[in-house]
Amino acid sequence: MKEFVLECFRKVIFLFFCCQSKIKKKALFLSYDGKQYSDNPRAISEAFHLVFPDYEIVWYITEEKSLSLVPEYVRVVQGRWLCFLKELSTARVFVTNTQLGAGIFKRKQQFFVQTWHGDVSPKQILYSDENFDGRIHLVIKDKQYTDLCVAGSKLGESVFHKSFFYGGKVLRSGMPRNDALYDEKRREDLQKKFGFTGKKVLLYAPTFRDYDIDDFVVNLDLEAVLDTLGREEWVCVVRGHSNTNGLYIASRDERIFNLSHYPDMTDILCVTDLLITDYSSSASDLALVGRPVVLYQPDIEEFSTRCRKLVYNFEESGFIVAYNMEQLKAVLRNYSLEEYRASDENVIQKFEIVRNCKSAFDVCDYIKNKIRE
């Protein structure tokens, strides 16, 4: 009842804002409910600025750490959710990577784009998740309001139909955030920015656990991994999931850097030479550019019973998988670059992942055509 009353109140406020102003040449972007300037909305926003030079670009951002990445042409809106509703009421285009949820409404002239934030994700989400808490009205709102979904694979496209109950247009042109992975100039600039020029970068990026969300403890001996790779040329970056409030690393090794505070995972993937993750969609992102990916899953039974059911069998996915430290070190010692690339290619073929370095522009072109109509 409390949620229903709050949503009615927000709708009244939204209608009030609509009465005050007409739709403007404005695009509004939201990433992870306003936490970051990142992911697919960031890539589309930067392409949108070039394709629609006469449009105002607006971002709703609540966390200060993201502001350093925001270009000068973007107008940032902060404050309470009502500030966001006010901007939404006059935006011609709205792009988000998370569920629309309560408190978002739509005018007839508006065009809403849903990109989600995990394409070849092994985890069940929303209504396909057996632990979904029954907020079916939120999924229905996504279905009714969304004009376009963006997917990077056959699996990603099916998720929109199964988990969002969505029956509209899905543009399977690749994940816009992955356009950056093909950009060697951006890779070099980011290596300089992070201080990793001349180094090989190992990224350890575990996903979150619903039962350990407050303070995730790194369960991997990172020093041993670095020693296996080679002591001098490798550094290790640890990146916690955005849903994790804290990340604890016991090691104080100077080769290990915690970049969990950095807003955009894509920038970190750009400088990554080897990715170790567990159940994250970032694995398939890096596979696109043929860089080594290893899945480290010592807690797969606990994760699949206490957190999320898994969508596919990792043994049949094409990914290289290790279930304990000895297996992981054996992989790192014995696998060649050609074997890693063969694994990446198997993953791409298995899930029919789209290779595309201009996905964000394809999304903008689709929006342009629909607006003309």
Image: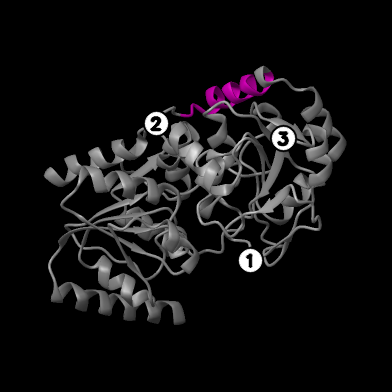
Q: Number of marks in the image?
A: 3
Q: Which residue is mark 1?
A: 245
Is-magenta flag for residue 350?
yes
Whole-percent x and y of residue 83?
32, 75
Whole-percent x and y of residue 148?
31, 45
Q: Which residue is mark 2?
A: 357
Determine whether the residue tagged by mark 3 lies in a helix, strand or loop: loop
Residue type at tag 2: Cys
Q: Which residue is mark 3?
A: 233
Circle 2 packing at 10 Å, graded few (<14), some (14-19), many (20+), is some
| The C terminus: image quadrant | top left
- Residues shaded magenta: 339-353
Disc 1 from disc 2: Cα separation:
33 Å
Residue type at tag 3: Glu
Q: Is residue 336 left or right of residue 329?
A: left
Residue 106 found in image quarter: bottom left
Which label sits in the foreground, 3 or 2? 3
First of labels 1, 2 by sequence position: 1
Determine whether the residue tagged by mark 1 lies in a helix, strand or loop: loop
First of labels 3, 2 by sequence position: 3
Whole-percent x and y of residue 10?
32, 77
At x 83% / y 29%, what residue is drawn?
Answer: 330
Q: Nearer the viewer, residue 79 or 65?
A: 65
Q: Is residue 231 left or right of residue 162?
A: right
Residue 163 appears in the figure: yes
